[in-house]
Image: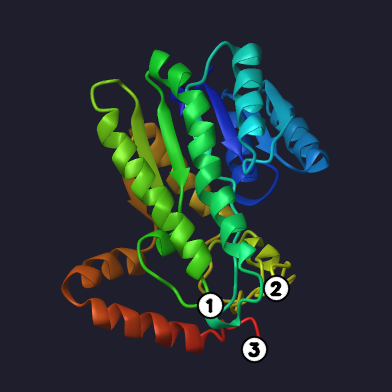
């Protein structure tokens, strides 16, 4: 990916999982990295690995749920590297609770602020620089942003919002040179579900599904994302099952609901199980 040489890439949620792996691989391709997340210690570790790969990198402690943090992070990126070529909206938080079991309704606001508004804030402040460089907006969404999943009401809603926002923005940006890519992974082995919020709004500290099967490894996920970035694609559904479900949702939506319920039961997805 020689096209990444010298490009400035912001990655939110860069301290772990997909964001961390994406940063390391982009570093090896010669990109300049702006690493954003709340955990400064973890960010410093990722920065060190990026520099060992030969890249220039800065870290900016950022809570994407806070508009001012996002503004400051984008300003730091421009100060350090002169502009922004790619913004990867990757920061996210999950949940695992049946709606009727939720005890703390602020859970929905918290998830929406991180997964949806965080992407809105970062995109708003980065857009002028992206337009100047005819850059690329990347949204790391989820299959739950296209199809509802039991116990994921708040998470699915936030990803549906993200999908709608970037689909609409893509149209607004036609002719500007800025492209919009929405990526919808399935289950990826990142540990995000261990940190998912439960019905009381506190982290579950354990996954709400069987993690021994059906997970894509992070390296494979990142390879797919990088290929889509290089091609400046508009929408990527990562799994074959996800692609089939998108078709079935159009022609047999009730069947999709039943399949989702069956998969939920088979994987013992309830956090109370």
Dot 1: element: helix
Crowding around mark 2 (Cα neighbors within 10 Å: few <14, some 14 to 19, many 20+) is some
Query: Seen from this angle, which residue lies furthest left?
Result: 251
Above/below status of 136 relative to 196: above
Determine which residue is flagged by label 3.
273
Q: Earlier in the sequence, mark 2 or mark 3?
A: 2
Determine which residue is flagged by label 2.
200
Residue located 20% across and 77% down the image: 252
- Look at the image and tell me in which quarter the C terminus lies: bottom right
* Residue 233 placement, left or right of 219: left
Crowding around mark 1 (Cα neighbors within 10 Å: few <14, some 14 to 19, many 20+) is some
Instruction: Please name the colour scheme applied to the rendered image.
Output: rainbow
Disc 3 to disc 1, C-alpha distance: 16 Å
Residue located 61% across and 44% down the image: 19
Disc 1 to disc 2, C-alpha distance: 11 Å
Query: Seen from this angle, which residue lies furthest right?
Result: 41
Determine which residue is flagged by label 1.
99
Q: Can see residue 233?
A: no
Above/below status of 35 relative to 247: above
Instruction: Indicate the position of residue 185 as horizontal and vertical percent values.
Output: 45, 57
Disc 2 to disc 3, C-alpha distance: 16 Å
Dot 3: element: loop
Residue located 48% across and 38% down the image: 120
Instruction: Indicate the position of residue 39 as horizontal and vertical percent values.
Output: 77, 43
Instruction: Please give the label number shown on residue 117.
Output: none
Above/below status of 189 relative to 251: above
Dot 2: element: loop
All told, the count of numbered labels is 3
Instruction: Indicate the position of residue 146 as horizontal and vertical percent values.
Output: 35, 61
Q: Quadrant of residue 104?
A: bottom right
């Amino acid at each position: 990916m020689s096209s990444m040489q010298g490009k400035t890439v912001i990655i939110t949620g860069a301290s772990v999982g997909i964001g961390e792996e994406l940063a390391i691989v982009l570093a090896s391709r010669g990109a300049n990295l702006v690493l954003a997340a709340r955990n400064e210690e973890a960010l410093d570790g990722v920065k060190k690995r990026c520099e060992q790969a030969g890249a220039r990198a800065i870290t900016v402690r950022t809570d994407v749920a806070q508009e001012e943090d996002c503004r400051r992070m984008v300003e730091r990126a421009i100060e350090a590297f002169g502009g922004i070529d790619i913004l990867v909206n990757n920061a996210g938080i999950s949940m695992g609770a049946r709606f009727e079991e939720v005890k703390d309704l602020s859970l929905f606001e918290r998830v929406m602020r991180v997964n949806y508004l965080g992407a809105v804030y970062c995109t708003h402040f980065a857009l002028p620089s992206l337009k100047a460089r005819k850059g690329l907006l990347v949204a790391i969404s989820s299959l739950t942003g296209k199809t509802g999943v039991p116990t994921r009401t708040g998470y699915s809603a936030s990803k549906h919002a993200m999908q709608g926002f970037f689909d609409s923005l893509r149209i607004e940006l036609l002719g500007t040179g800025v492209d919009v890519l929405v990526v919808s992974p399935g289950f990826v082995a990142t540990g995000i579900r261990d940190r998912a919020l439960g019905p009381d709004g506190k982290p579950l500290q354990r996954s709400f599904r069987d993690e021994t099967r059906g997970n894509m490894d992070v390296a494979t996920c990142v390879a797919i994302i990088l290929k889509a970035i290089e091609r400046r694609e508009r929408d990527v559904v990562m799994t074959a099952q996800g692609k089939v479900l998108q078709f079935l949702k159009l022609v047999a939506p009730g069947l999709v609901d039943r399949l989702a319920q069956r998969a939920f039961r088979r994987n013992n997805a309830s956090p109370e199980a």
